[in-house]
Image: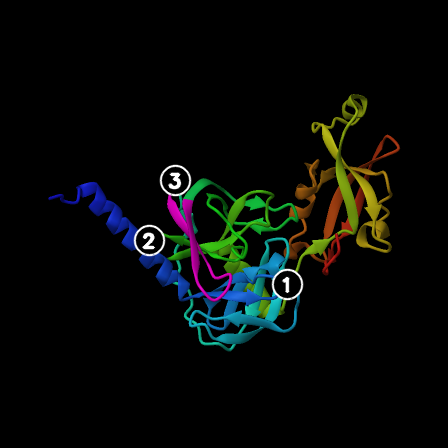
Amino acid sequence: MTSSSPAAGVLSALSDDLSGAVAQAARSVVAVHARRRIPSSGIAWRPGIIVASNGTISREEEITLTLPDGASAAATLAGRDATTDIAVLRTDAELRAVDRGDAATLLAGKLVLAVARPGTSVTASMGVVSAVDGEWRTWHGGRIDRFIRLDISIYDGYSGSALVEAGGRVLGMNSSRLARSLALAIPGSTIDRVVDQVVATGGVTRGYLGIASQPVRLPEALRRTHNLGAGLGLVVVALEPDGPAEQAGVMLGDILVGLDGKPVGDPIELLAALGPERVGRALELRVLRGGQLVGVSITVGRRSEGRR
């Protein structure tokens, strides 16, 4: 006669706990039909509000949801923020909003689950938090309150799935679109900020200058002549006709070396200065033009979809 070992009992209890966590989160996870092929996942974040991965919302009309009970419901796009990969949908379907946890408690090595619904049935993937860090900027300039990298499989339909702790509480939304080949999670605090803005205004306000730039190494002679500490600047490679930068006198080939008194050498640093609070305010740039250092004051414009 054999008896189960203590280790087997622990594993059995862990298995039951994880299954329970998936079942708890699944009550608030839906399938979002807004693109060709398989649907993506979405989370009932608040009553009447679904959050999903912006990159999976290919159409803005005739969006439908598959609910946890298998029923279908209509949804409308309330607004989106491509810079943080968050889309906000409205629905009249009665859904249970997620039980929320705090992503600030996450540590590397913590066991987590991705709970998705890429169709009628719920699916899950298990892994660990591989890295955590502070606030960061996406390559589009969006502000994410905490860097959370996951060692977890994000299958087709998993973008927009729930990041779930072992106790079943939802800590954020998973995305495979914020960084190449990396599974990242968007913490709940970032989602709340975007949802608040979309609900209040129908979108997320961001500033724009109407320029495209790329890093360039500054010649040592110019650095010495103008006492420039940084080794990189941003060369202007395109200007939007009649955009804020062109109106302010910025020219193709100008090299941006200063932003509000601070060195600038990375496009993300420029994007980081274009938050909603900067719209309509002046941004002071230092520009190298023909070997001379000049100052340019630009009034930050309001960015619409597709603007730089």
Q: Residue furthest right?
A: 290
Residue 85 seen in render:
yes
Which one is in front in this view, the residue at disc 2 or the one at disc 1?
1
Q: Residues within 10 Å of mark 1 (few under 14, many from 20)?
A: few
Q: Secondary structure at mark 1?
A: loop
Kind of residue at disc 1:
Arg
The disc placed on residue 109 is 3
Where are the magenta residues, as a range? Answer: 108-127
CA distance separating discs 3 and 1: 36 Å
Residue 66 percent across, percent down from the top left: 50, 70
Q: What residue do we see at 52% from left, 76% from top?
A: 73
The disc placed on residue 36 is 1
Chain-order first, disc 2 or disc 1: 2
Kind of residue at disc 2:
Leu
Q: In screen coordinates, is 289 left or right of 105?
A: right
Is residue 182 rendered magenta in the image?
A: no
Residue 148 percent across, percent down from the top left: 48, 45
CA distance separating discs 3 and 2: 16 Å
